[in-house]
Amino acid sequence: MILSHEEMKKIFENLGFKGFELRRYDDSMEKLLSFAVEDNAKGYAIDVVLGGLQHGENDGIALMEKHYAKPERFRNLCEKWTEIILHFMCYHPLESVFVSGMTLPDDEDFLEKTPGQEGYLLEFPLESIDDLDEFVDRVFQKTYGEMTFYFSSLDMMFHYFRDDVYLLVTLKKVTEENKDALGLLKKIVEAKGLFLV
């Protein structure tokens, strides 16, 4: 069974999503959503530990990650990430939130049913999101998807994962505007007791 475009869209509408566009995962979208570091830009992590420490060579890092991986601590960490994005949005316009993935919790065969074996890619314009906390919760409850918050004027992406204790921020290219924006982001992140590394 292969799902048509309209059938796929209906599945996500039935999961409570609205105002989204179902997009094809082509080369240009893959490049846009990639969290690989671009040639002329740097990737950052909003992390629970300071930078400059080699992962795995310091027992404190492993203990900290285990500490934040506990369900209640991880929920609190996710709340901080969402608040960081909300605060950052006050100063820089958020264009879209992308949700991408291969399977759904209630349909393990979803990938096999999608055209071109590409899974799903949903684009939510900001005006379709009434409450960011509720939106993030719904994505994590109803999909196995990853979220990417796209600040187009900054060529900046926030990659929101389900399983890691850090939030990745990548630049598609370095500009004077996003250099200034990173300074603001660092202040917002530190106010939450986290580190931009």
Image: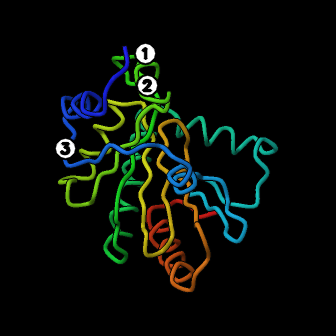
Task: Characterize the local packing of mark 1: few (<14), some (14-19) or many (20 or more) Cα atoms within 10 angstroms.
Answer: few
Give the total number of marks visible in the rendering: 3
- Labelled disc at residue 18: 3
133 on left or right of 168: left
The residue under label 3 is which amino acid type? Answer: Lys
Report the residue at 19% width, 44% height from top: 18
The residue under label 2 is which amino acid type? Answer: Thr
Upstream in the sequence, badge 2 or badge 3? 3
Report the residue at 43% width, 25% height from top: 103
Report the residue at 42% width, 46% height from top: 147
- Labelled disc at residue 103: 2
Q: Alpha carbon of mark 1 to alpha carbon of mark 2: how far?
A: 7 Å
Q: Residue 186's x, y, as percent?
A: 53, 72
Q: Secondary structure at mark 2?
A: loop
Q: Alpha carbon of mark 2 to alpha carbon of mark 3: how far?
A: 19 Å
Q: Nearer the viewer, residue 27 or 193?
A: 27
Q: Secondary structure at mark 1?
A: loop
Q: Nearer the viewer, residue 86 or 96?
A: 96
In the rendered view of the protein, which quadrant contains the C terminus?
bottom right
The residue under label 1 is which amino acid type? Answer: Asp
Q: Residue 58's x, y, as percent?
A: 78, 45
Q: Nearer the viewer, residue 2 or 186?
A: 2
Position above or below: 34 against 114:
below
Give the residue at mark 1: 109
Q: Alpha carbon of mark 3 to alpha carbon of mark 1: how far?
A: 23 Å
Q: Quadrant of residue 80?
A: bottom left
